[in-house]
Amino acid sequence: MTYQVKTFNAIAQSGLDTFNDNFKINQTDDPDAYLIRSVNLRDAEFPQSLKTIVRAGAGTNNVPIHRATEAGIAVFNTPGSNANAVKELVISLMISASRNIFAANAYSNNHVGADVSKRTEADKTKFNGTELMGKKLAVIGLGHVGSLVAEAALELGMNVIGYDPYLSTDAAWNINNHVDRSNTIKQAVKNADYVTVHVPKNDETYKLIDRNVIEAMKQNSILFNYSRLGIVDNEAALEAVLDKKLKYYVTDFGEPIIADQENVIVTPHIGGSTLEAESNGATQAANTVMRYLETGDTVQSVNLPAMKVPFEAPYRFTVIHKNVPNMVGQITTILAQLNVNIASMSNAAKKDTAYTIIDVDDLNAENSIELIQKIDQIPEVYRARLIKHK
Ligand SMILES: NC(=O)C1=CN([C@@H]2O[C@H](COP(=O)(O)OP(=O)(O)OC[C@H]3O[C@@H](n4cnc5c(N)ncnc54)[C@H](O)[C@@H]3O)[C@@H](O)[C@H]2O)C=CC1
Ligand SMILES: O=C(O)CCC(=O)C(=O)O
């Protein structure tokens, strides 16, 4: 069996080299998998052949998750693959902003005459900065990126307060116990010299940092958005910069309103743009594509329950379906009608969606096609798929 993988965006070669010989990378119209980064698929039509979309990176807000689920497409990301890159960039920008590096560099570029040494000594006090040590950082969202930023800030001698009402128990173990925790966002930002936001983009986090939160921030503090456009209200952030409430607003997501504004520092979505992060993400993504297509494993799927089931027999049916009663009953009835014996069966659900894996010993070309067709005809089934164990 050869699987077709269609790539979007620049995918690191090390990731493409990870694929085994059963996978062909090409720009076919009938791919089994999409391997993507930031391409916007929100309005895209999906070909019937498409079984999985794997995002090399963290954010999946560029994928219409609900529509993908209904089309029987498993969506994955590569959690943490670029978190260190974002951490290093945010820390470097905290230092650069505190030391007025961008203004100082612009000054130097504009003062290159013979009297440069004399003028420099006279003018340099304009760029006097502050240090991070002893200052307070508020981290909103303590997941892969936020927890690393918090850890690095502690190492630099900062005090750190975090706000994350949805932190999983597993993730909580990774948070340094010197990070104070706040129950409200306003409390977290209140006395912070720096506020950085590291949350996914969704309906709840749209304008999470709005005018009210910015008002609650400390005078002369610095705000960072290295998550997504829209999580900080850019209009409110710009106003706060113009009013000198914020010393700087620093973001990875430009839009016309904040372009070329003094004390607004905009980078072009480069948080994850390091050789290491791109390689990690692409390699992790390639492994995910192979694992899902060759075994049906859904660990770290964004839209399906996490299942990792060792093969108990040579053939495997995977079924993505609605999480409603009697689905397993309907599927096993079809298997019984076609006289196919079940070697093992597993089922799990995530919110409205469920996933069933059934291993069977004996199949022939005819009953396998009929089985898939009959299971696919159950109205609550999104996709049934047959995998042959290698
Ligand atoms: N600028 C860039 O190039 C990059 C941007 N990102 C973005 O950074 C963000 C964070 O990424 P990761 O840390 O990898 O994600 P993650 O999923 O590991 O962590 C997100 C954290 O936010 C928390 N959270 C969710 N809703 C929240 C809310 N309303 N208030 C406070 N906390 C909330 C979650 O509980 C979770 O702990 C994402 O938006 C991602 O797309 C990630 C990598 C690169
Ligand atoms: O460089 C990229 O692919 C974007 C990284 C990113 O924003 C993410 O992983 O969420």
Image: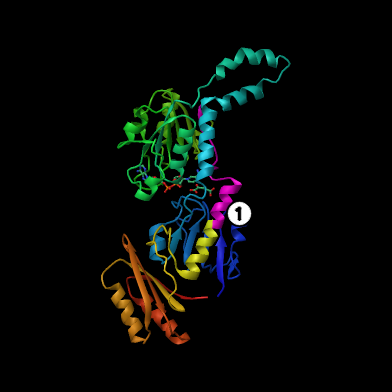
Is residue 275 one of those drawn in magenta?
Answer: yes
Camera-side residue of 380 and 14: 14
Furthest residue in direction right, as rendered: 114
Residue 284 in picture, x, y percent from top left: 53, 57
Quadrant of the picture in which ligand 1 is shown: top left
> Which residue does the image show at 57% across and 73% down from the upper left?
2
Q: Quadrant of residue 321?
A: bottom left
Q: Amino acid at mark 1?
A: Ala
Q: Which quadrant is the N terminus positioned in? A: bottom right
Way the structure is coloured: rainbow
Q: Which residues are magenta?
A: 262-283
Q: Is mark 1 within 8 Å of ligand 2?
A: no
Furthest residue in direction left, as rendered: 325
Residue 231 in picture, x, y percent from top left: 41, 41
Q: Residues within 10 Å of mark 1 (few under 14, many from 20)?
A: some
Is any part of residue 8 visible from this angle?
no
Residue 233 in picture, x, y percent from top left: 40, 36
Question: Is residue 35 positioned above or below 233 on the image?
Answer: below
> Which residue does the image show at 53% across and 21% down from the upper left?
129
| Count of residue discs | 1
* Location of mark 1 (residue): 12
